[in-house]
Amino acid sequence: MRYELLKDVITLIEEFESTRKEDGWTEDVLGFKGWLCRQHKREEAAVSPPDWEGKAEGRSAESVISTMLVHLNRYARIYARAAMTGSSFSTQEEFIYLINLNVFGPMTKMDLIKRNIQDKPTGMQIISRLIKQGWVSQSNSEVDRRSKVISITLTGKKALEAQMPKIRQATQIVVGNLSTGEKLELIRLLSKLDRFHHPIFLANMDQETLLDSVMKQYGLTEQKKKDI
């Protein structure tokens, strides 16, 4: 028996155990296989790293990722506007709010706003439009009388259902030509980023000190390369 191979496997399992929660892998054989496959892909990527515009001039990977996320958000909004054509929806956020209420049930105004990662004034405007349309109703919270609980109405459900075929088309177009495996890997990576950013969003830090506070709190280092 090759004991060196066994030692290597045990080392891999130990590494898997220490990092699996961070990346969302399950603690079983399927999770280990997925993690191992991703590690292999990472090693391949390290050998042959991707190229991008401005790389030779010092543009960092962080800059490229940030720009691409902004671009993808804009692409998604274009498709969302197309999905709303001919409907009573004014913005993408309106049917996203309805989808959240339909899936997760009634919640307070602030819980709904925070779930959609928006500031209070913007969120309140969206909720007011939904109430005016008769798509949601509000009632006093049994937990906190100062809060209002928002629920989707039957009219709201019908408006959502009528638009869902186009919404599904838009979401399919957004993920483009990614394979099933690539979609799952992207979900893991985006989920990891979301887990990083969400507590920062909830902390509602002062804008003037936000960047320095996050850099210090999470031990991030300044990017030495030139960002374009």
Image (cartoon, rainbow, N blue to C red):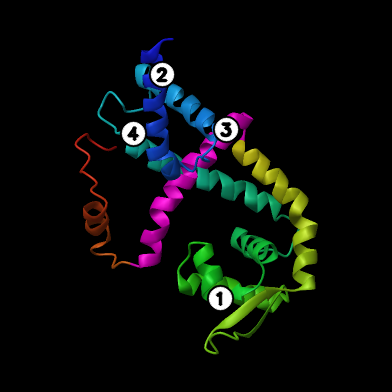
Amino acid on which disc 2 is placed: Leu
In this picture, residue 98 sits left or right of residue 66: right
Report the mark closest to the observer, 3 or 1.
Answer: 3
Q: Residues within 10 Å of mark 1 (few under 14, many from 20)?
A: some
Residue furthest out toward the top: 1
Mark positioned earlier in the residue sequence (4 or 2): 2
- Asked if the residue under mark 1 is in contact with the one under mark 4, i.e. CB atoms within 8 Å, the reply is no
| Foreground disc of the pair 4, 3 | 3
Helix, strand or loop for disc 2: helix
Q: Which mark is residue 109?
A: 1
- The image's mark for residue 61 is 4
Q: Is residue 221 magenta?
A: no
Query: Which residues are the magenta region?
Result: 176-204
> Can you say whether 203 is above or below 176 in the image?
below
The chief SS type of the magenta part is helix
Residue 70 shows in this picture: no
- Within the image, what quadrant is residue 209 found in? bottom left
